Amino acid sequence: MLNYILKSWIRQKELFILLLIGVVTMSCGLSFLFNISESNKGTVVDTLQKRWKSTYDIVVRPPESLHVSDANNGLLEPNFLSNIQGGISFDQYDEIKRMNGIDVAAPIAMIGYTGLGIQINKKIENVVQEPGVYKETNIMSQDNSYQTTTYFTVGDDYFINPRLASNPLENGLYSHSTQLLVGIDPVQEAKLVGLDDTLAKFGQNRYFNLDADEAFGSNGKVTIPVLINPNPIGKMMFQNKVDKIDVSQSQIIKLQSQNQDDITAYLDQKKSEKNVYSFTASGKQLQDTIFNETENTNPFTGEKQLQTIGTFQPSSVMFYKTNPISYKEIESPFKERWKYAFQVNEQKLDDKDATRFPSNTFRMLNAIPVKERPTVRYDVLGFFDPSHLKISKDPLSELPMETYRAPSAKLVLNGKDEPVNPPVTITSSGTPVGLLTEQPTLITTLGAAKLLGGEKPISAIRIRVAGVKKISDENQKKVEDVARQIEKRTGLIADVTIGSSPQPVLIHIQKIDHDGGWIEQPWIHLGASYTIFKETSMGFSGVIATVIAVAIIYVLATNYVSLLSRKKDFAVLLSLGWKTKDLFRLVMIECGLLSAVSLFLVWGISFIWAGQGHAISILKLLIASLFVILIYYSGSLISGSLIRKITPYETIQTGEVSTMGKRFISTNGIVKMVLNQVLGKFQRNMLSILAIAFPTALVSFFLFITFRLKGVMYSTWMGEFLVMKIGTNHYIAMGIACFIAIVTTAEITWQNVVERKREFSMLMAVGWTQTSLKTLIYLEGIIIGLIGGGLGVAISILMIIFLYGNITFIDFLYVLPTIVIPLLIGFIASIIPSRILSKISPFIGLKG
């Protein structure tokens, strides 16, 4: 039997070549896909679960905090927690802590903006002696946007009114910066981000008392324990300067009858005559002064020689509450790069507020009434470094949802919508009215928050669900169930943040007097990476399933063609005394040989893959081997059932020009002739149609997923990395499936041509040229491809409707062009069979 099989392969060289090509393609394809699926899984897991891992799975916020989110697009503002001013009670917090399935519930309370002050030891006696009008300017900011201006007079001849009579320099210099104060639960914060492990190593730094809250006070005077983040202070600069204003004696007389506001407005327009005094302190000097007062050393470096400029003042007043910025969604000018765009408008502050801050700002001050402002004394426990927190620090994938993240943005387009190259980095202004939301500088306890913020001081609660370590369907459902329970039992908003990713958003800066251009800012896209994880995993699993399905069809076609090509041989063997079971055993041996070759290739490629340093799964290798065996022997079983229909009578059957028994349409043209042939041999041609339909359906569906994910995958900074890594494997797999479809269609077409040799000979005898006959075969391949392509597109549309509910006309336009692929498959598959025509002589058709 083995000898017969080998000689049979040698006699039918073209069919044997197609057989080998199919075996090699299928074996290499399955080995590649099963091995790459492990790498594919690693890429997705590493990128989405590790690089985009948030410290919390759910964020709970009050219903009145809708301003920090864009519910329609699933977006959250960067550093959105700093924009929520309370709203959650301690009872609601306790209710959440009692719920099952919660590992960490870390509350955070945005208490408001208080001050950090330094009394500067600079001798300034007798600095101003010459009579006249003077302007003192204090600048305290990262970009000169935080300043105060004071006018005063020296000398009786320059007296304007009593409020301008005193010289502020007589009380010395005082630097003052406004910093965000937040309250946390020390135990939960340590569990969530490891705040207790970020304390400076030198000096006497300590964490909060975990047994009792150390905040106390009443009647508007409160003492609170604080940890200080010195980084924002180190980025600041303090400058004091005194200028003499050019004002004549006659102008002084006119000003004496005006009110304070009119006098200030008039003096603002006057030029400086000369600078009489100036003092500048760097961020390091400000830091060192605070370090020296509390630690007598730099707590991070151990440095003893500090550049101090004065005395730290450990008390201040609560001036402002947090206030959100107002975003208006607009059309993005470059949707391919930035899918989402918003606009913020510059506003004019009230005059009394503009004395401390720029007159034009992006958010209004939420000032606490003067009589209600509490006095806060700081009990400084130490200093902490946010860079040591257990949060993502990768600049490409850092989620802008962490409380301690320093805000940033990039100016990418100027006011004329022209690219800014290179983009200009924008940082926070160090004020409560700036464009970028501030990070907290002072950390205290929830007890302090209650004393300063009332009964509902908690702004948000960050939840980590127990047992959730990675992105998966099961974990996603678990987190969503917990979020629904929180909303049901507390009435609060619970956003699922697991599987979120950074989303670049374009912000148009509309200033009062001109166009400020466009900045790019990383926002939070809720569930974006989970969508990518789900759909890319589903897509790759679909690719493997499709390749296996096409491989099964290929083996069925191979066995079927092999049976048809040797039908007379088998009939002769039966007439010589062979039994049907002997023929069946012959087919099984042939399948065993082919599966052995295929297994050898699968294992060989896997070991080569492992030798290059890639991880391989033995379990998946065994599964791939099992699939190879099942694919080949499932095909042999069907062929075995057809062997029973062969009779010895077929050895004496001869003379038929065509074996097709029925014409479906009248044959009065080449196209109808081809249609009759396709429909007449529809059962065998159906194998080709299915082999083409499956990869076509997957190509169409994968293109839809790609374009559907464009708003998520391509618009996220790490999304392009995923497309590059995973998309290539998808396309390789689809190429393998399409190639197997070509081989399958070629084998079927080859058999059709062989069976029609007498028919083609007759057509040549009556005048048909080889070119005309080749066109006939090409058309047959194209029509089979067209039917298969139509079926594939229909399947992909049904998949899209099943998974996503509907398909738009635009989506349909993305799917429809894939019909070109099966047309090419059908055409290419008919090229090799068409070469048989060169061996056909018109003489055969004239024989009786």
Image (cartoon, rainbow, N blue to C red):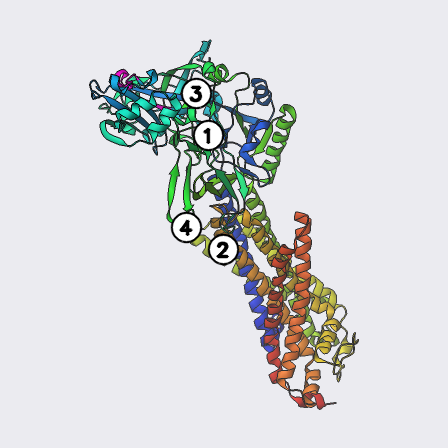
Label at residue 238: none
**Residue under numbered circle 1:** 403
Q: Which amino acid does label 3 sit on?
A: Phe
Label at residue 606: 2
**Residue under numbered circle 4:** 419
Q: Which amino acid does label 4 sit on?
A: Pro
Quadrant of the drawing holding the C terminus = bottom right
Q: Which amino acid does label 1 sit on?
A: Thr
Query: Which badge, 2 or 1, is on the more N-terminal residue?
Result: 1
Gap in angstroms between the C-alphas marked 2 and 1:
47 Å
Query: Which badge, 1 or 3, is on the more N-terminal residue?
Result: 3
Picture layout, residue 109 above or below residue 28: above
Asked whether the residues under the numbered discs 2 and 1 touch, taking CB atoms below 8 Å apart as contact, a structural biologist would say: no
Query: Which badge, 3 or 2, is on the more N-terminal residue?
Result: 3
> Where is residue 760 shown, x and y percent of the image?
68, 83
Query: Which badge, 4 or 2, is on the more N-terminal residue?
Result: 4
Looking at the image, residue 128 sits to the left or right of residue 646; the answer is left
Label at residue 319: 3
Looking at the image, residue 635 sits to the left or right of residue 737; the answer is right
Looking at the image, residue 423 sits to the left or right of residue 479; the answer is left
Q: How crowded is mark 3: few (under 14 residues within 10 Å), some or many (20 or more)?
A: many
Q: Which amino acid does label 2 sit on?
A: Ser
- Residue 170 magenta-highlighted: yes
Report the span colored magenta.
165-177
Quadrant of the drawing holding the N terminus = bottom right
